[in-house]
Image (tube, grey):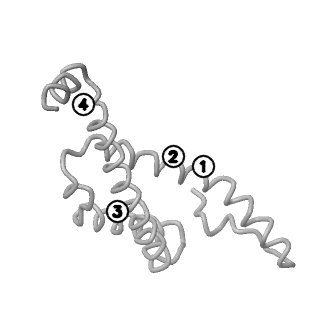
Amino acid sequence: MTRAVDKVKHCHTMQDVRREVNALDDVLVPLLVERVGYMTQAARIKQGVEQVRDEARIEAIVARVRQRAEAEGGDAEVMEAIYRSLMEACIAYEHREFARLRAGQADAAQNTPAARDAAGSAA
C-alpha cells in the first residue's frame, strides 16, 4: 500500500507546488463540505445544546487522526492542529444549526391552528 507522503510529486517551481495544492483542494473541499453536512445531522439528532461539544469524541478523533497521519508518513502534530481547528469550526457551526433548527420548530409550533387560537383567545 502506498503512503500518502509517497504520492507527493517533486516540484521544480512554486507554480508546480500551487498546481498540486489546488488539485488537492479540489478533492478536499467537497469532502469537507460533506463532513460539515453531518454536523447539521448531529444538530438535528442531539437533544440538548450541551451535547454539541463532546470532549471525549474530540480526543478520540485526535487520537485516530494522529495514528492515520503517522501511518501515511505525515506529521501527527500538524494533523492534530488542523483537525482541532476543523473541529472547533464544526462545533461553532453545529451550535448555529442547533439554534436554527430549534427556532424553526418553535416557529412551526406557533403557526399551528391550536397555537393561533390560543393566542387569539389570550388577546
Residue at the spot of label 1: 30
How crowded pointer 1 is (Cα within 10 Å; few <14, some 14-19, many 20+) is rated as few
Q: Are marks 2 and 1 in contact (CB under 8 Å)?
A: yes
**Label drawn at residue 61:** 3
What is the spatial separation of the Cα atoms under label 2 and label 3, in whole angstroms? 17 Å
Q: Nearer the viewer, mark 2 or mark 3?
A: 2
Q: Amino acid at mark 1?
A: Pro
Q: Which mark sits nearer the N-terminus, 3 or 4?
A: 3
Q: Amino acid at mark 3?
A: Ile
Q: Are marks 3 and 1 in contact (CB under 8 Å)?
A: no
> Which disc is residue 34 wearing?
2
User: For the residues marked 3 and 1, what is the alpha-carbon distance in whole angstroms?
Assistant: 20 Å
Q: Give the CA separation, mark 2 to mark 1.
A: 6 Å
Find residue 123 and report its image quarter: top left
Q: Position of residue 39 (x, y in %)?
A: 39, 49
Q: Earlier in the sequence, mark 3 or mark 1?
A: 1
Q: Earlier in the sequence, mark 2 or mark 3?
A: 2
